[in-house]
Amino acid sequence: MAYRLPTAAAMQMTSDEFLVWESGDDHRYELIDGQVVVMESPSEGHQVVMANILVALRQHVRGTGCRALPGLDVRCDDANCLVPDVLVYCDRDRRSRGMEDCPLLVEVLSPSTAYKDRNIKFARYRSLAALREYMIVDWERRTTDLHRLAADGSWQVTRYSGNDVVYLASIDFALPGDLIFEDLDRAA
């Protein structure tokens, strides 16, 4: 049974409630600290980079038991259900609606979401036991920050520029920067 409420403004709910809730409108939402928050519509440049990464990851994980998917809800805890741009999901059970078994999450920045993606969302994502890498792509600056969980439990960050190859240890994949930013010059 889905919850249907007239508006998401100032709504509080748990992540379990959020996962079955339907807004009844055309917006996408996330749950941050129990608060329903509307997601911004992505620009063409954002979508180009997101699609490039998704296609490359899908091709790489094909046949491994993992899947690369766009924009699915990730249940971090009882009050946070976030939507990364791309995720690699490896839960063999597949009955979970909250996609918690993600070794890799990807966010493509836009000017209005940069702070939230780098700080608020990353802080919530770190609660996921399966998460090993968090990739943040700034398509306007053509940089990629890769946060990797170290053996001591700390998160180490490596910054890549332009055509640098981003090595994703969580899925053993070298992702070329020129592929990440391919066709970006033609985007509006």
Image: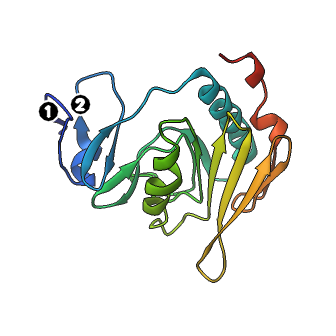
- Tell me the number on the disc at residue 23: 2
Q: At 48% across and 36% down in the image, what residue appears?
A: 112
Three-letter code for the amino acid on which mark 2 is drawn: Ser
**Residue 61 in the image: x percent, y percent?**
70, 48
Quadrant of residue 29 in the image?
top left
Q: How many marks?
A: 2
> Which residue has dot 1 on it?
5
**Residue 30 in the image: x percent, y percent?**
35, 43
**Residue 170 in the image: x percent, y percent?**
69, 61
Q: Residues within 10 Å of mark 2 (few under 14, many from 20)?
A: some
Three-letter code for the amino acid on which mark 1 is drawn: Leu
User: What secondary structure is marked by label 2?
Assistant: loop
Q: Nearer the viewer, residue 176 or 35?
A: 35
Q: Nearer the viewer, residue 60 or 45?
A: 45
Marks 1 and 2 in Cβ contact (< 8 Å):
yes
Taking the image as shown, residue 91 lies to the left or right of residue 151, namely left
**Residue 184 in the image: x percent, y percent?**
74, 24
Q: Is residue 187 visible?
A: yes
Q: Earlier in the sequence, mark 1 or mark 2?
A: 1
Quadrant of residue 14 in the image?
bottom left
Q: At 63% across and 34% down in the image, what residue appears?
A: 50
